Amino acid sequence: MRLSSVLGPTVVFLGALAIWEAATSYGWVDGLVLPSPLAVVSLFAADPGLLASNAGVTAAEAMSGLFIGNCLGLLLAILFVNSPTSRRSVLPLAMGAQSIPIVAVTPALIIGFGNGMEPKILIAAFLVFFPMLVNAMRGLRSADAEVGELMHTLSANGFQRLWMIRLPAALPFIFTALKFSACSCHRRGMGGLGPWSRSLDRAGELAVSRRRGVGGGAHLHRVQHGNGRARRRH
């Protein structure tokens, strides 16, 4: 192994860490948004179990979204390649959904599913779905037409043509999508869920009070007032 192949990435990595530390030390970035590398290392040294347990939850959310989004994208790609009607009907909707920003989807998911694992898994699936759909469709269409005609003369059914011709031809494209998805599934907006959750809890309370009417709103006000007095006593 040549020294330059190791030295270059190492220098870039250390430079990125130095810029990161400087940005947090000089207050260019809020420490609550992006803690410094030294703070992360000190926390890991002080309580390694805390980060390990949270890393397990993060990995479970990311892998669940990776599996759901890629399976859905591959299944829809197979459907679109074999059914032009479904492609013309559903593909524009999928392309339109991809143009929606994550920050616009996150509040609706938190209101609908709460601040647990479900919205994060859905965001991860949302991020990896479209790359798999596009790459799988391109790969399935790249199958050799002459081999397809040969399978047709041998009276092969649709599943046999898919399994023996289309899927092997699509494997390089599918693995390219998986390579991209393995990185993007961790960008599922975990940093954005925390700031949204408290404000959206208030929005959920207002929605409940509107559904219940004046009585429900008064009851909600009494509960909040009682909780505030209890906190002041403590």
Image (cartoon, rainbow, N blue to C red):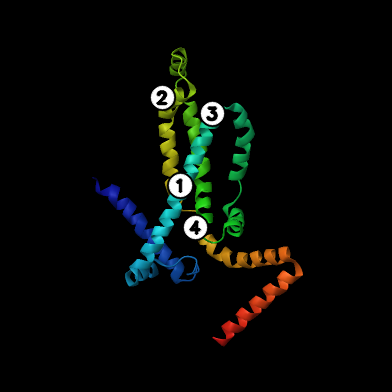
Image side of residue 35 versus residue 232, left or right: left
Q: CA distance from mark 4 to mark 3?
A: 33 Å
Type of the residue with mark 4: Met
Determine the image quadrant of residue 81.
top right
Q: Which of marks 2 and 3 precedes in the sequence? A: 3
Marks 3/2 in contact by CB < 8 Å: the verdict is: no
Residue carrying label 1: 66
Using the image, tell me which numbered label, if any, was put on residue 117.
Answer: 4
Q: CA distance from mark 1 to mark 3?
A: 22 Å
Type of the residue with mark 3: Val
Residue carrying label 2: 164
Type of the residue with mark 2: Met
Residue carrying label 3: 81
Residue at 43% over, 57% down: 58
The relative height of residue 195 versus residue 143 in the rendered view (above or below) is below
Residue at 38% over, 65% down: 51
Residue at 64% over, 33% down: 89
User: Dot 3 lies on which element?
Assistant: helix
Q: Which of marks 2 and 1 precedes in the sequence? A: 1
Q: Residue 72: horizontal and vertical position, in percent?
A: 51, 40
The relative height of residue 194 versus residue 149 in the rendered view (above or below) is below
User: Dot 2 lies on which element?
Assistant: helix
> In the rendered picture of this protein, how many numbered marks are placed on residues?
4
User: Dot 4 lies on which element?
Assistant: helix
Q: Which of marks 3 and 4 precedes in the sequence? A: 3
Marks 1/4 in contact by CB < 8 Å: the verdict is: no
Q: Residues within 10 Å of mark 4 (few under 14, many from 20)?
A: some
Q: Nearer the viewer, residue 13 or 219?
A: 219
